[in-house]
Structure formats: structure tokens, C-alpha cells
């Protein structure tokens, strides 16, 4: 049955014996708990199975979350309300990302873990934010129509027309704002450096033909999680529980039977604290020296980090990396100034939201005739929540106050960027 939900819990249903240990199944983005239907007969022989829906999926309340950690917390609160303390967990793709957060945040409650079609980082942050822009501009229709190509192997699509149609209808029914928020959550999800902290017995399971989270992603999880096991299902793509229900059901049953423990492992505490070793800094994110400003005092490092994060969210990694390379020697201090004060301070002040700041920025750039920056900030406006129609309204308004010639040139730049940014990707 579906329980009434508060805004900070998740819509769910429970099947199986009342007194059996609890196994939680997490869905992929764009799907509902029904993606696990064909495993239920096998798994409910031994477990009480709780399946949940992501916000805005399957008729669940449209209460968006832009963090996999927050969704893990919502799931824990859902389990608390259901009276469940200790549980096993299997999650597919987005559900797998929530699973890694559970293993890191609440290992004492997690008896065993299975990550299906999952990854420590899903693609690139830019790709997910770009997808959010496309959905905001065009809705979910194109995403839904292309879902079968991402989710199922060609041979499966050829003979399972009913399931292919079901998958399209399921994706089409998702609340767009919740889908966009989920894209933001996946853009921010990166647990590569934390995999070694996962102590829960883990099975990593993937499809041999998966192009979304290919077997290389599965192998990276196994390499990073201590004592993790790998299972690759031949002939399956991304939604391997739907394509190969019997194989997945058997693999999950075998894993949870073999690894389930009723009590969390006791971790011995050393007599002397271990020395703290700083985590290595990835090569892709070099540490920048903090420049000395007036009076010789260094500005706080958090402002630069916050500015770099905001700038990348709105302008994209490629733009920021290119600007850093071009200015590294000629104008490093200026690049630092822009990142620290424009993006780290002004763009993050609480007085105005990002949409309003984008409106102001676009207007100022039109007035100044700064077309290169206008193109970049049109992209930023789309990523910050403005729709193409709203951007055109802004430019129409500038025609009155900045002049028709300036607005005409701005329209040409903005429409080119909007076409590029909102074009559905294959």
C-alpha cells in the first residue's frame, strides 16, 4: 500500500512477511518502484521488501531535492516512520547513488548493499546541468521517447514492445522540476574519494551492454570499495532488473543471504589516534595559491571555492577551464578577483536569487554591447532557472531602455545560444 507522506519522507510500498528482515529497493531516475516488480516474488520469500519512489515520480509529491545525501536522509526518515532500524539495500543507478550515501552516512543501519548500474560519479556535472536546461526548455517528452534506447539493449527492445511503451509512459509522467532537481543531484554526486570508507558488504551489478553506466564504472566501484564483488549480466543494458529479472533476482538473493548480519560489525578503536593524512587533491582541481591583498592578509579560501563552484554551475566547466588557461599567466590576479568577489560573494549574496541576478546581468551586458559575455550569461541564465521565453522578455525590455540596435544584436546572440543549449542531446 502507499502511505501518506510528509514532505521529508518518500512515497513507498511494502510487500512480504511481516516479521522478515527488511530489504529496500531504490529506483533509477525516470522510473518508479514498478521497475522492481519482477524481483518481488523471489525476494519476498525471505525478506520484507520496501520500495520507494523518487520525488515527483509515480505520483509522489513534487518535493524536489538537489542532493543524493538529502534523499538518503529522507529515506532514513521513511524507514524510521515504518519502524525499520536495520535493513539491506539494493539501488539501481540514481538509487545506487543513494545507496552509497547510506553506506557512508548510516553504515550501522545497513546490513548489506547492492549497487546496480551505478557509478561513483555519473558522467560529468556539465552534462547533467545541460540536461536540466533541455528539460526546462522543452519538457520531458523527448527524454521520455529516447529512454528505451538508453535503458534497454537493442535485442530486448525488438521483442518487448509492451515494456518499451511502459518505460516511455513512466518517464513522461515525471514532474519536470523534480527531474531537473535530480539532474542537479547527479551533477553534484561524486564519491570517488570516499569509496574506501564503505565497510558494508557490497555487490556491484551491471549490464554488459550498458552505455549509461558502462562496465568500467562498475569495475571502478569494485576497485574502490573494500572487498566488493562484481557481477556483469550478459546481454543487458542499463535497466538490468527489467531486462534480466530472473538473473538479477537470483544474484541479489544470493548476495543478501550470504552477507546479511543482524548486528553491525564492531570496529576496534586504536589506543592511540591514527595520524591524520590529508586527502590527495585530484589533478583536475589544482590548489590555487591565495593571493596577498592590501595589508598582506590573505583573503579567506572559502570565498574562492564557493565562487568557483557557482561559476562552474552556471557557465560550465569547459568555459571556466578555458578562461583559467587563457588568463593563467597574463591576468591570474584578475581571474582570482572575478572568481572570489563576483562569483563567490556577489552572486551568492542572499538579497537576490539567481534568476533575478541573471536578469540584471543580461540587461547590463546588452547595454554595454558585451556580446561574448552575453552568450556566456545566456547559458548561465538557462542553468539558473530562466526559460527561453523569459530571456526573450528581458531582451525585449532592454530594447526600450538600451536601444533597438543593441537589443537586435543581443537577440541574435541569445537565440543562437538558446538553440544550442536547448537542443535535445542524443
Image (cartoon, grey):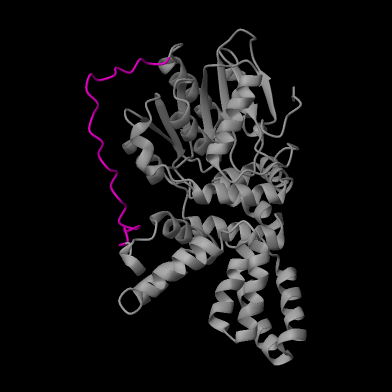
Q: Is residue 208 left or right of residue 12?
A: left
Quadrant of the image occupied by residue 7: top right
Residue at x 35%, y 42% (from the top left corner)? 193
Q: Is residue 273 magenta?
A: yes
Q: Closest to the observer: 387 or 149? A: 387
Q: Nearer the viewer, residue 310 or 254?
A: 310
Q: Quadrant of residue 292?
A: bottom left
Asked if 398 appears above or below 179 in the picture, the reply is below
Q: Quadrant where the N terminus lies?
A: top right
Say which of 85 and 171 sits in front. Answer: 85
x%, y% of residue 281?
Answer: 30, 51
Point out residue 323 in the picture as x, y percentages from the top left corner: 41, 73
Query: What stretch of residues is rendered in magenta?
Result: 264-289
Q: Residue 366: x, y in percent? A: 64, 82
- Nearest the eye: 271 or 169: 271
On the rendered structure, is 214 left or right of 354?
left
The picture quadrant where one finds residue 267 is top left
Amino acid at each position: 500500500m502507499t502511505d501518506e507522506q510528509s514532505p521529508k519522507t518518500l512515497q513507498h510500498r511494502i510487500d512480504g512477511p511481516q516479521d522478515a528482515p527488511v530489504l529496500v529497493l531504490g529506483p533509477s531516475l525516470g522510473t518508479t518502484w514498478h521497475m522492481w516488480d519482477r524481483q518481488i516474488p523471489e525476494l519476498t520469500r525471505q525478506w520484507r521488501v520496501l520500495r520507494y519512489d523518487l520525488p515527483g515520480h509515480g505520483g509522489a509529491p513534487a518535493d524536489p531535492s538537489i542532493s543524493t545525501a538529502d534523499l538518503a536522509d529522507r529515506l532514513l526518515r521513511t524507514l524510521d516512520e515504518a519502524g525499520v532500524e536495520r535493513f539491506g539495500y539494493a539501488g539501481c543507478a540514481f538509487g545506487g547513488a543513494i545507496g552509497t550515501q547510506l553506506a557512508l552516512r548510516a553504515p550501522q543501519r545497513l546490513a548489506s548493499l547492492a549497487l546496480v548500474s551505478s557509478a561513483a560519479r555519473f558522467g560529468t556535472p556539465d552534462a547533467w546541468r545541460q540536461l536540466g536546461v533541455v528539460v526546462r526548455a522543452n519538457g520531458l517528452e523527448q527524454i521520455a521517447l529516447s529512454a528505451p534506447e538508453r535503458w534497454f539493449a537493442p535485442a530486448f527492445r525488438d521483442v518487448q514492445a509492451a515494456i518499451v511503451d511502459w518505460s516511455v509512459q513512466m518517464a513522461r509522467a515525471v514532474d519536470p522540476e523534480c527531474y531537473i532537481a535530480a539532474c542537479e543531484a547527479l551533477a553534484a554526486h561524486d564519491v570517488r574519494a570516499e569509496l574506501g570508507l564503505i565497510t558494508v558488504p557490497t555487490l556491484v551489478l551491471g549490464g554488459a551492454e550498458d552505455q549509461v553506466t558502462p562496465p568500467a564504472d562498475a569495475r571502478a566501484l569494485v576497485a574502490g570499495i573494500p572487498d566488493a564483488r562484481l557481477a556483469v549480466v550478459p546481454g543487458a543494458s542499463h535497466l538490468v532488473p527489467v531486462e534480466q529479472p530472473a538473473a538479477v533476482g537470483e544474484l541479489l538473493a544470493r548476495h543478501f543471504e550470504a552477507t546479511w548480519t543482524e548486528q553491525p560489525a564492531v570496529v576496534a578503536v586504536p589506543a592511540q589516534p591514527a595520524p591524520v593524512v590529508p586527502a590527495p587533491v585530484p589533478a583536475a582541481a589544482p590548489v590555487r595559491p591565495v593571493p596577498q591583498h592590501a595589508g598582506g592578509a590573505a583573503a579567506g579560501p572559502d570565498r574562492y571555492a564557493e565562487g568557483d563552484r557557482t561559476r562552474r554551475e552556471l557557465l560550465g566547466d569547459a568555459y571556466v577551464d578555458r578562461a583559467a588557461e587563457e588568463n593563467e599567466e597574463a591576468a591570474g590576479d584578475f581571474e582570482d578577483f572575478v572568481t572570489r568577489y563576483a562569483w563567490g560573494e556577489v552572486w551568492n549574496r542572499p538579497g537576490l536569487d539567481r534568476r533575478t541576478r541573471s536578469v540584471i546581468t543580461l540587461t547590463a551586458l546588452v547595454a554595454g554591447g558585451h556580446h561574448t559575455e552575453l552568450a556566456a550569461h545566456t547559458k548561465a541564465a538557462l542553468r539558473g532557472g530562466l526559460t527561453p521565453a523569459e530571456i526573450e522578455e528581458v531582451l525585449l525590455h532592454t530594447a526600450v531602455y538600451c536601444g533597438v540596435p543593441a537589443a537586435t544584436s543581443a537577440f541574435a546572440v541569445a537565440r543562437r545560444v538558446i538553440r544550442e543549449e536547448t537542443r535535445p542531446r542524443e
